Image: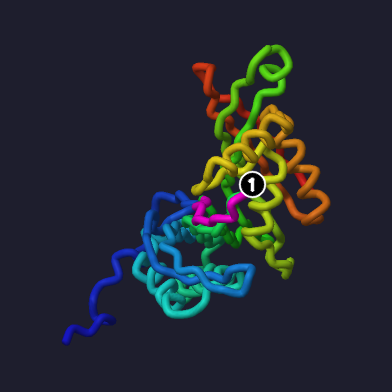
Amino acid sequence: MIDAHSLPDVQGQADARGVALERVGVTDLHYPLTIREKGGGQQRITARLDIFAGLHPEQRGAHMSSLVEALDGYRSRLFSMDDLVALVRDVRRRQDDRGLAFASAEVRIRFKYFIDKAAPRSGLSALVAYDCGFDVALDGPGHKAVLVAVPVSTVCPCSLEISDIGAHNQRARVDVELRQALGDDRFIWIEDVIALVERCGSAEVHSLLKRADEKAVTERMFGAPRFVEDVVRDVVVALRAAVPDVRYRVRCESFESIHAHNAYAEASGAC
């Protein structure tokens, strides 16, 4: 058997070019994880991960296998934001143990999260998929973030006002990023962010609708016309009330049905 300690450590060799690297690691790594649902259940996800460490100018390369090795311990256990913070610290420790303390470490997780949503009249339910993510970074004081993308529908207030019949309406995407300090132990549930955003659109988006449901959704849409500017401002106001003392970024892009472009609005700040 080959003794691993007898093999040359090329990554650990000294480098004389004097260039520090902010992020070195692996990207697009797919891994199965299990996360908690707000209702008490669990959901198995296929996570896409980017795992990074900072690299000092004196060291030639990072030890990529150690980055993946740090993740493997979470494959068969329930995974939470606290575990992600621990994972990032583990990534950093494994690199530190190689002989040079690293300035930073970061893990990004992206995944589809499914919610069983009931139609408004029939009560029939079907799963709706949402693009979600968690970020943790050790960069100075460090931070952790929850990211949620929510599809909604929007009816143009101007079109509704000036048209004798109907108004143009379309699907829009609202992206919310909520960033907390590492020491903030509040848990932000994905389900709560989704519900908050859906209340700020003209109507929710469903996977399963019968005719009575379509009637209800359509009538709600036309009773709540929204520009992208309205959606972003309403989301920000709702976030300020729901999750104070976090930083936010809110973006809305409306995939316009009658224009050869999309409509877009964005805001960021602190709640």
Q: Quadrant of the N terminus?
A: bottom left
- Tell me the amino acid under the disc marked 1: Val
Residue closest to the eye, 157 or 150 = 157
Mark 1 nearby-residue class (10 Å; few <14, some 14–19, many ≥20)? many
Visual colour scheme = rainbow
Magenta-span inclusion, residue 127: yes
Q: On the rendered structure, is 237 left or right of 202?
A: right
Q: On the rendered structure, is 96 left or right of 37?
A: left
The percent position of residue 3, horizontal first and vertical second, equals 22, 84
Q: Residue at x 38, y 58 (%)?
A: 26
Q: On the rendered structure, is 178 left or right of 4?
A: right
Q: On the rendered structure, is 224 left or right of 48?
A: right
Residue closest to the eye, 225 or 51 = 225
Quadrant of res 27: bottom left
The percent position of residue 270, horizontal first and vertical second, equals 78, 47
Q: Which residues are magenta?
A: 121-130
The percent position of residue 91, horizontal first and vertical second, equals 48, 70
Q: Which residue is mark 1?
A: 176
Report if residue 211 is visible in the image.
yes
Residue closest to the eye, 95 or 129 = 129
| SS of the residue under disc 1 | strand
Q: Residue at x 73, y 32 (%)?
A: 223
| Residue 25 against residue 90 in the figure, above or below | above
